[in-house]
Image (cartoon, rainbow, N blue to C red):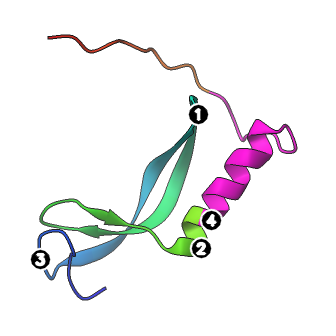
Amino acid sequence: MTKCNFCGNKNVELRQTDYIYQHKGHYMLFENVPCEECTYCGERYYEANTLKKIEKEFFEVLNRKKVPSRKIEMPVEVFSM
């Protein structure tokens, strides 16, 4: 990528990040996902093959065809003003 499509900054770096996939009230955290991240605004870009693999693994775990690496418990709070 030559520049950020969001802010136009030309400094985009290859990084690994966490990605949360969500579908119909089910969530799965993926760690160490490769992406390109804008050093100015933080916008992240993922390759199509990466997102397809995430979706495939999500549905394998959801349908119990695969066991996740580990499970975590996460507190939930409803936001109110």
Q: Does the magenta portion include 75?
A: no
Question: Mark 3: few, some, or many residues within 10 Å (few <14, many ≥20)?
Answer: some
Q: In the rendered view, does 66 fall on the left or right side of 69?
A: right
Tell me the residue at 12%/77% (across/down).
Answer: 8
Circle 1 SS class: loop
User: Looking at numbered disc 1 in the image, what kind of residue is underneath it?
Assistant: Lys
State yes or no: discs 3 and 4 in contact (Cβ < 8 Å).
no
The tag earlier along the polypeptide, 1 or 4, is 1
The tag earlier along the polypeptide, 1 or 2, is 1
State yes or no: discs 1 and 2 in contact (Cβ < 8 Å).
no
From this view, report whether residue 18 is shown above or below residue 37: above
Q: CA distance from mark 1 to mark 4?
A: 17 Å
Q: Quadrant of residue 61?
A: top right
Q: Which residues are magenta?
A: 52-71
Q: CA distance from mark 3 to mark 2?
A: 25 Å
The tag earlier along the polypeptide, 1 or 3, is 3
- Mark closer to the observer (1, 4): 1
Instruction: Report the front residue among 72 and 54.
Output: 54
User: Mark 4 — residue?
Assistant: 52
User: Mark 2 — residue?
Assistant: 49
Q: Quadrant of residue 24?
A: top right
Circle 3 SS class: loop
